C-alpha cells in the first residue's frame, strides 16, 4: 500500500529558527535533544577511537600518558553525562511517551524547553573545559587526585552539575505527566512497558541526581576554598568522596539501562506480534531495580578500605539487583514463544540486546562476588562488564528505538538492507572489541593504563580492530538514517503494525498529537484481541 | 589446578588463589549454561516462529505464575550460594594469620617502597619468603593508589590518611607482577613492581645481607643497579636528554643554577642532600616534584649512586 | 456558560481542564521539594559524619554562635510562613489588597532574616571563623575547628541562597497580584510558592538546633 506524508504535521506547521528554539512541542524538543545528544555520542566515540588506536602498541604512538589520561577521562565524561544519561529519556521519552499515553504534551512544556537549554549550557561548559586544559581525573573524579589536578576540573564539574539539573527537571516532568495526563481508560496496568520504564527512571533521576549535585559542589569547594572535607591533612576523608559519588552514580547506571529495557519490551512485543509475557512482573521489576539500585553503591568500593561489614552488606544486596533484570530477559524470551516473529532491523537490535546484556549481567554477578572482585576490581574485566551493559545493553536499545520510531518521527522509512548490515557490523565489532577485554582483565591487565606489558599486545590489537568496525558501523547508520529523513519512502501511520497509542497518529504526527481527547480502546499488547493495520482507521477485532 | 589455565587466570601463586579460582570457575560454568540456554532458545524461537509471508498471526496468551516463580526462585538460590561462597573466601582474604611477618608498604607517585621490621628496605621489588604469611601494612604519601598482585589474587587501596591491610602467603617461588590499580596520574601505568618470592633460606640471607655491592661489583656498578632499582631512571636520563629531572650525564662537577638564583657546583654533598631533602635546592627550569628517599635509601646506597654519577662523564 | 469558565485564560492548552492543571502543578512542586530535601540531605549527611568524628570540637565551636540571633531568625521565618499561608488564604477569599500586604510582609521578614544573617556572617569573617583553608581563629579547642565552620557556612549559605530565591519569586508574585493575575479560581502560583517557602522554613528549623543548640 502506498502511503503519503500528511500535508500538515509538527515539522512543517511552523518554520524558522525561532519556531524551533522557542518551541514548546515535546516532539520538537525531542529532536533538539537528539541533535545534541547524538553529536556528543560522536564526540565521545572519537575519543574512544583515539584510545584504542594508542593502545595498539605499548609504546607511545601519538599520545603520551598525560594525553591518554585526558582521552579516557573525556570519553567517559562525555559518554556518561552528555550522551547516555539523557539519551533515551530526553529523545525518545520526550517524543514518544506523551503519544503513548494519549496526551497532548508533557505536564510542563516550558520546563521541558528549559531542560534542553540547561543541557546546552552544560554542554558549553564541557566544551570550554576541553579547550581550557581538558580533564585527566577519570569520570569518577576521585580525591585527592581531583583536588590537585591542574586540568580544567572546575569547568567540567560545573558542566556535570548543570547537566544534573536538566536530568532532574526532565524526570520531574515525566513523573507528573505519567501520573496526571494519561488518557481516560488508561490505567496504570494499561500503560505500555516503555512508560513504566521511563517512570522508574524518572524516579531515580529525581532522587539520586541532587546528591550528585551536592557532591560535585563539595568537590568544587574543596578545590576553590580548601574546605578540606576530602583532605586528610585537614581532618577530611578521601573515601567519603567515593561514598557520596557512588550514591548517585550507581543509581545512575539504572537511569542508563531501565529506559533501554523499556524499549526492548516494545520491540519484542511488536516484532513477535504477541502479548508481553509477565507484564506485571516486568513493570514491577523496573520499580524493583530502581529501589534496590539505591542500596548497592558500596560494591564499587570493596577494596577501598571500607569496613568488611559494609562490603558484605553491599555484596548481598547487589545480588538482589540482578534478579529483576533476569526476570525481564526470561519474560521477553517467553513472549517470543509461539509468537509471529519478524526479523526487521529494530528486532535485530533487540535480539542483540538480549544476548549482550545477558553477558553483561552474568559478569556483573562475578564482580558482585566479594572474593573475586578483589582480583578483578579496576581491571579490564570491569571495563568490559560495563561496556557490555551500557553499549551491548543501552546503546543497542537506543538504536533499536531510533530505528523503530524513526518512521513515526519523520514519516519516512530508512533502507532496511543497510540497517541489517549495520546491526551485524555493530554486533560483531562490539564483541571483537570487548570480549577479549574480559580475558585481559582476568589476567590482571589494569584499566586506565596508557601503556602495558608486552604480553597483552595481541589482545589490545584485536580489541582495537573491533573498535574500528564499530566506528564504521555507526557512521553507516548516521548516513542512511539522515538520508531517510529527506528521501525515505513514506511509512504510513503504523508500519510495524503495533498496538501502542503513538501508532494511532499520522506519521509524522500533527502538532497537537491527537484530534480531541483520545480514549483507550484496547490495551498496548492486545494482539490476541485486535488486528492492527498500517492505517488510521479503527482496527478490526478478532 | 586446571581452572586457572582454562579460564585465563594467572598462575596460582598464593594460598587463596585456588579458592578464588574455583568460585570463578563455578560462576563461569553456571553462567555459560544459562547463557547458552538463553541464546539457543532465542535463536530457536526466531527460526521456529518466523512470521510467514508478512502475515502476523497471534496465539492465545497463557499466563504462568508457576513459570515466573520458578525462574525467580532458582536464580535466587544460585545467587545466594555464590554470595555465601564469596563471603567465606572474602573473610579468609581479610583475616590476617597470627604468625604473619609484617612489611610496611608505601605507595607514592609513582613507585612502591617497602620497609621490613628488621630494617631492610626495598623499592619496586618486594622480596618475601615462600610459604610464610606476609602482612602488608599500607599507606600512601599522596593520592590514592592500589596495590595489586594478580598471581596472589590480592588487591587493596592505599590511602593518605590511614593504614589499610592485606596479606598473602606465597606458594611458589618466582617473580610476580605488582600493578597500581587506582588511577593516580601521569605515571599510573608504569607504577610497576615485582614480588620476588625466595626459598626461606635465601630470603634469610637476603635480609641479612641488606644493602651494599655484591662481592664482584664496584661501587659504581652497584650505583648503576640502585639507579634502576629505585626508579631514578624514570625522571633522570643518562644520555644528556632533559626529562622530569636534570640528566645525570656529566652531572658531577657541573655548575648548576638553582631556582632561587644561586649557583652551586655538583659535589658529593649536593647529591646526598638532593636524595634526602630534594626541596632544599631545586635546579632552575624543573618542577619541584622529586620525592625524598629518606628512610628508603641507606648510606651505602647513596654512596653507590654518587660513584655511579661520577662515572657518567660527558 | 461564558467562554472563560469553559476555557479560562490561565488554562494551558495541553491540559484538558483546570483541575488537571492544578493537580499537575501540585505534584510537580512536591517532587521538586523532594529533590531539595535530597540536596540538603547530602549536606546533613556530611554534618553527621564529621560531627561523629569530632564531637568535642563541634561542641566547643557551637558556643561561638549567637543563640539569640539564631532564635530570632527562627521566629522570623516561622512568622513569615504564617504570612505566606495568610496570603494564600486572602486570595482564596478574593482579597487582592490583603494578599499583597501578606506577600509584602513575607518578603520583609525574609529580608530581616537575611540582615541578621549578614551580621552573623560578617562577625565570623572578622574573627576568622571561616571555612577550610581561610580559617584563622584561635580559641576553639578540638581537632580541625574549621570543619564546623565549613559545615555552618555551607548549610546556612545554601539555605540563605534559597531564601534569596524565595524573596525574588514572592516579589514577582506581589507584582502579578497587583496586576490582577490571580483570583479565587486561580491562585496556584501563590500556593506553590507557599509550599516552597514552608520547606525553606522547615530546613531552617532543622539547621537551628543542629548548629546553635547542640550541647
Image (spheres, rainbow, N blue to C red):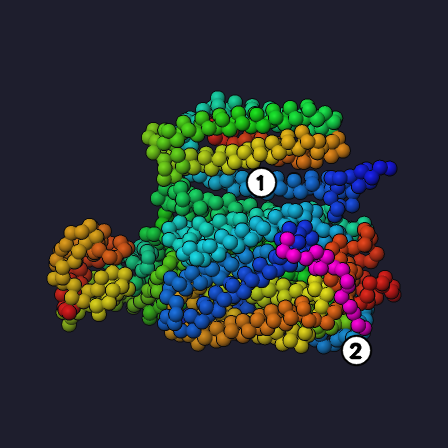
Residue B58 located left or right of residue A53: right
**Residue under the point 58% across and 34% down:** C168
Crowd rating for badge 1 (residues with CA inside 10 Å; few <14, some 14–19, many 20+):
many
The circle drawn on residue B53 is: 2
Q: Chain of mark 1?
A: C
Q: x and y percent of residue A523 in the render?
A: 80, 58
**Residue under the point 54% across and 34% down:** C164
Q: Is residue B1 visible?
A: no
Front residue of A320/A41: it is A41
Magenta region = A1-18
Q: Main secondary structure of the magenta part?
A: loop
Asked if residue B53 is positioned above or below residue A51 in the image, the reply reads below
Question: Mark 1 = which residue?
Answer: C36
Q: Is residue A263 visible?
A: yes
Q: x and y percent of residue C22 in the render?
A: 73, 39
**Residue under the point 52% across and 42% down:** C42
**Residue under the point 45% across and 71% down:** A53
For the residue labelled by badge 1, is the local secondary structure a helix, a strand or a loop? helix
Front residue of A512/C164: it is A512
Asked if residue C128 is positioned above or below residue B149 in the image, the reply reads above
Q: x and y percent of residue B83 in the render?
A: 55, 58
Q: Chain of mark 2?
A: B
Amino acid at each position: 500500500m502506498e502511503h503519503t506524508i500528511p500535508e500538515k504535521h509538527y515539522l512543517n506547521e511552523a518554520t524558522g529558527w525561532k519556531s524551533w528554539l522557542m518551541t514548546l512541542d515535546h516532539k520538537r524538543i525531542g529532536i533538539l535533544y537528539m541533535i545534541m545528544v547524538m553529536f556528543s555520542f560522536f564526540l565521545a566515540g572519537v575519543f574512544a577511537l583515539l584510545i584504542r588506536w594508542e593502545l595498539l602498541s605499548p609504546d607511545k604512538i601519538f599520545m603520551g600518558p598525560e594525553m591518554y589520561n585526558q582521552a579516557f577521562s573525556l570519553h567517559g565524561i562525555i559518554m556518561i553525562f552528555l550522551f547516555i544519561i539523557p539519551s533515551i529519556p530526553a529523545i525518545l521519552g520526550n517524543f514518544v511517551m506523551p503519544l503513548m499515553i494519549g496526551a497532548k504534551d508533557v505536564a510542563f512544556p516550558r520546563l521541558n524547553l528549559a531542560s534542553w537549554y540547561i543541557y546546552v549550557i552544560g554542554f558549553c561548559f564541557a566544551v570550554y573545559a576541553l579547550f581550557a586544559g581538558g580533564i585527566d581525573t577519570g569520570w569518577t573524579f576521585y580525591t585527592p587526585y581531583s583536588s590537585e589536578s591542574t586540568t580544567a576540573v572546575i569547568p567540567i564539574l560545573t558542566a556535570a552539575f548543570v547537566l544534573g539539573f536538566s536530568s532532574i527537571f526532565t524526570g520531574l516532568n515525566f513523573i507528573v505527566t505519567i501520573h496526571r495526563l494519561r488518557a481516560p481508560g488508561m490505567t496504570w496496568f494499561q500503560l505500555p512497558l516503555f512508560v513504566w520504564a521511563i517512570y522508574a527512571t524518572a524516579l531515580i533521576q529525581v532522587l539520586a541526581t541532587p546528591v550528585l549535585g551536592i557532591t560535585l559542589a563539595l568537590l568544587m569547594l574543596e578545590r576553590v576554598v580548601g574546605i578540606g572535607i576530602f583532605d586528610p591533612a585537614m581532618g577530611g576523608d578521601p573515601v567519603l568522596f567515593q561514598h557520596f559519588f557512588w550514591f548517585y552514580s550507581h543509581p545512575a547506571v539504572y537511569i542508563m539501562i531501565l529506559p533501554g529495557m523499556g524499549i526492548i519490551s516494545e520491540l519484542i512485543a511488536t516484532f513477535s506480534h504477541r502479548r508481553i509475557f509477565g507484564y506485571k512482573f516486568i513493570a514491577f521489576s523496573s520499580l524493583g531495580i530502581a529501589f534496590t539500585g539505591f542500596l548497592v553503591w558500596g560494591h564499587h568500593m570493596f577494596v577501598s578500605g571500607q569496613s568488611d561489614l559494609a562490603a558484605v552488606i553491599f555484596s548481598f544486596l547487589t545480588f538482589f539487583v540482578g534478579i529483576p533484570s533476569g526476570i525481564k530477559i526470561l519474560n521477553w524470551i517467553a513472549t517470543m514463544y509461539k509468537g509471529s516473529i519478524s526479523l526487521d532491523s529494530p528486532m535485530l537490535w533487540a535480539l542483540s540486546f538480549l544476548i549482550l546484556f545477558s553477558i553483561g549481567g552474568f559478569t556483573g554477578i562475578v564482580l558482585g562476588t566479594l572474593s573475586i572482585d578483589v582480583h578483578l576490581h579496576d581491571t579490564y574485566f570491569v571495563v568490559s562488564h560495563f561496556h557490555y551493559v551500557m553499549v551491548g545493553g543501552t546503546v543497542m536499545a537506543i538504536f533499536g528505538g531510533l530505528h523503530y520510531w524513526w518512521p513515526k518521527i519523520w514519516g519516512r522509512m530508512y533502507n532496511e538492507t543497510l540497517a541489517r548490515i549495520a546491526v551485524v557490523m555493530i554486533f560483531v565489532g562490539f564483541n571483537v572489541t570487548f570480549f577479549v577485554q574480559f580475558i585481559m582483565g582476568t589476567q590482571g591487565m589494569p584499566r586506565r593504563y596508557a601503556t602495558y606489558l608486552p604480553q597483552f599486545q595481541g589482545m589490545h590489537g584485536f580489541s582495537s580492530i573491533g573498535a574500528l568496525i564499530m566506528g564504521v558501523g555507526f557512521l553507516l547508520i548516521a548516513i542512511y538514517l539522515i538520508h531517510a529523513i529527506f528521501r525515505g519512502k513514506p511509512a504510513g501511520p503504523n508500519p510495524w503494525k503495533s498496538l501502542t497509542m503513538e501508532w494511532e497518529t499520522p506519521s509524522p504526527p500533527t502538532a497537537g498529537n491527537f484530534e480531541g481527547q483520545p480514549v483507550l480502546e484496547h490495551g498496548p499488547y492486545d494482539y490476541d484481541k485486535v488486528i492492527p493495520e498500517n492505517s488510521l482507521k479503527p482496527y478490526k477485532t478478532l | 589446578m586446571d581452572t586457572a589455565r582454562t579460564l585465563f587466570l594467572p598462575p596460582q601463586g598464593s594460598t587463596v588463589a585456588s579458592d578464588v579460582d574455583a568460585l570463578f570457575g563455578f560462576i563461569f560454568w553456571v553462567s555459560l549454561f544459562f547463557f547458552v540456554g538463553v541464546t539457543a532458545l532465542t535463536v530457536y524461537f526466531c527460526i521456529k516462529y518466523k512470521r510467514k509471508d508478512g502475515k502476523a498471526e497471534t496465539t492465545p496468551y497463557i499466563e504462568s505464575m508457576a513459570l515466573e516463580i520458578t525462574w525467580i526462585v532458582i536464580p535466587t538460590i544460585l545467587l545466594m550460594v555464590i554470595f555465601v561462597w564469596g563471603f567465606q573466601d572474602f573473610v579468609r582474604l581479610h583475616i590476617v594469620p597470627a604468625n604473619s611477618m609484617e612489611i610496611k608498604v608505601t605507595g607514592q607517585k609513582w613507585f612502591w617502597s617497602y620497609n621490613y621490621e628488621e630494617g631492610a628496605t626495598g623499592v619496586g621489588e618486594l622480596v618475601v619468603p615462600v610459604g610464610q604469611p606476609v602482612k602488608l601494612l599500607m599507606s600512601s604519601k599522596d593520592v590514592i593508589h592500589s596495590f595489586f598482585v594478580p598471581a596472589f589474587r590480592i588487591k587493596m587501596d592505599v590511602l593518605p590518611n590511614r593504614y589499610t591491610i592485606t596479606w598473602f602467603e606465597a606458594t611458589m617461588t618466582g617473580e610476580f607482577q605488582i600493578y597500581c590499580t587506582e588511577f593516580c596520574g601521569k605515571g599510573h601505568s608504569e607504577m610497576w613492581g615485582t614480588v620476588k618470592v625466595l626459598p626461606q633460606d635465601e630470603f634469610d640471607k637476603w635480609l641479612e645481607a641488606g644493602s651494599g655491592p655484591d662481592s664482584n661489583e664496584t661501587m659504581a656498578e652497584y650505583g648503576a643497579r640502585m639507579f634502576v632499582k629505585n626508579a631514578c631512571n624514570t625522571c633522570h636520563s643518562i644520555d644528556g636528554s632533559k626529562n622530569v629531572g636534570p640528566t645525570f650525564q656529566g652531572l658531577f662537577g657541573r655548575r648548576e643554577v638553582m631556582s632561587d638564583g644561586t649557583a652551586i657546583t655538583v659535589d658529593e654533598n649536593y647529591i646526598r642532600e638532593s636524595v634526602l631533602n630534594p626541596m632544599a635546592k631545586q635546579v632552575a627550569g624543573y618542577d619541584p616534584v622529586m620525592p625524598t628517599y629518606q628512610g628508603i635509601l641507606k648510606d651505602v646506597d647513596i654512596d653507590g649512586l654518587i660513584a655511579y654519577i661520577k662515572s657518567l662523564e660527558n | 456558560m461564558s467562554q472563560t469558565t469553559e476555557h479560562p485564560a490561565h488554562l494551558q492548552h495541553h491540559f484538558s481542564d483546570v483541575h488537571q492543571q492544578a493537580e499537575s502543578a501540585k505534584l510537580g512542586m512536591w517532587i521538586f521539594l523532594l529533590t531539595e530535601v535530597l540536596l540538603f540531605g547530602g549536606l546533613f549527611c556530611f554534618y553527621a559524619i564529621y560531627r561523629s568524628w569530632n564531637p568535642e570540637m563541634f561542641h566547643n565551636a557551637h558556643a561561638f554562635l549567637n543563640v539569640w540571633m539564631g532564635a530570632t531568625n527562627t521566629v522570623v521565618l516561622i512568622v513569615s510562613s504564617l504570612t505566606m499561608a495568610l496570603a494564600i488564604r486572602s486570595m482564596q477569599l478574593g482579597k487582592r489588597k490583603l494578599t499583597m500586604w501578606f506577600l509584602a510582609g513575607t518578603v520583609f521578614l525574609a529580608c530581616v532574616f537575611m540582615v541578621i544573617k549578614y551580621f552573623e556572617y560578617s562577625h565570623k569573617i572578622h574573627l576568622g571563623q571561616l571555612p577550610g583553608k581561610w580559617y584563622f581563629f584561635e580559641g576553639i579547642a578540638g581537632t580541625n575547628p574549621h570543619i564546623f565552620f565549613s559545615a555552618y557556612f555551607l548549610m546556612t549559605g545554601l539555605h540563605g541562597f534559597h531564601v534569596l530565591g524565595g524573596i525574588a519569586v514572592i516579589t514577582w508574585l506581589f507584582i502579578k497580584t497587583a496586576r490582577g493575575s490571580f483570583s479565587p479560581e486561580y491562585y496556584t502560583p501563590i500556593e506553590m510558592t507557599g509550599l516552597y517557602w514552608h520547606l525553606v522554613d522547615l530546613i531552617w528549623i532543622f539547621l537551628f538546633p543542629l548548629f546553635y543548640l547542640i550541647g
